[in-house]
Amino acid sequence: MELLSLTPGTICVLVGPPGCGKSTFAARYPASWRVCLDLYRLAATDDEADQTATPVAAEIQNLLLDARLARGRTTLVDSCNVHAHVREGLLARARYWQRPIVAVLFDVPLAIAEAQNSNRDRVVPSSVVRDLHEMLPTADQLRREGFHQVHQISRAQPADPGPLQTEREHLAEQARELAAQTTAFAAGLIRSQPVTDHAQRIAALARDLARTAARVEAVRA
Ligand SMILES: Nc1ncnc2c1ncn2[C@@H]1O[C@H](COP(=O)(O)OP(=O)(O)O)[C@@H](O)[C@H]1O
Ligand SMILES: [Mg+2]
């Protein structure tokens, strides 16, 4: 993924549904440049998905935006920003502080956003990914709204299946390990008298797990 060169003092608004790669993009820049609603929801509630904390998270984000824009510090807004009224607030701040404002539009196909969303730690419900993906603006729309530049990150297919493949292999390894442990445990139980239905069920489960591990391993992106 390309690294954009941003004029110092720019507010750079990432626009895209969950799973499209915004935080991955932001991670290529200094950490202090990033403001992120997820982080502030987490700080307020221990749960980054707790939408009841969105108002307080937005207040924190606005405080940080004003602090940074006042000082001309380049700032990345790492949240979905697919709602026009949210972008309007960011455009108003840029106007107030007279800073350049650019958008990075992640127009990745829904299937990719969904696949990437389901392959990470915090999985957003797929209906939410779908709804937010549908609201994605076009580059022209963003320019009309007042963004000075729009950089488009378009992907027809996963550019780098590496992390997904690694995830799959890791899962397969875990399943194999679990299967081996369960087999050993069940064998021990069966040897010790009396043989219980329970032990036989565990042995069956271990065989299922081993089969699952083989299937998971066979799947290729
Ligand atoms: N270009 C890419 N190719 C393959 N996987 C990616 C790419 N960008 C992001 N991912 C993966 O997709 C998942 C979601 O990315 P993330 O940056 O957290 O999305 P967002 O912040 O938009 O919700 C992560 O597991 C990340 O590693
Ligand atoms: Mg993110």
Image (cartoon, helix red, strand yellow):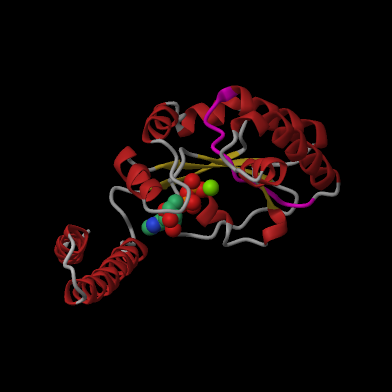
> Where 177 sits versus 49, above or below?
below
Q: Is residue 92 above or below residue 160?
A: above
Q: Nearer the viewer, residue 192 or 141?
A: 192
Residue 48 position within the rendered picture, expressed as x and y whole percent measured from the top left: 60, 43
Relative side of 86 to 110, left or right:
right
Taking depth in this image into account, of 68 and 6 the one nearest to the observer is 68
Q: Is residue 206 left or right of residue 6?
A: left
For the point 60% across and 45% down, the residue is 78
Q: Main secondary structure of the magenta part?
A: loop
- Residue lying at 74% horizontally and 35% vertically, measured from the top left: 94
Q: Which residues are magenta?
A: 73-84
Say whether residue 45 is left or right of residue 144: right
Q: Position of residue 44 (x, y in %)?
A: 72, 41
Query: Which x, y percent locates residue 185?
Result: 26, 73
| Quadrant (top left, top right, bottom left, bottom right) of the C terminus | bottom left
Q: What residue is at 54 percent from the left and 37 percent from the top? A: 80
| Depth order, front residue of 4/219 | 219
The residue positioned farthest toward the front in the image shown: 194
Question: Residue 159 at what x, y percent from top left?
Answer: 33, 58
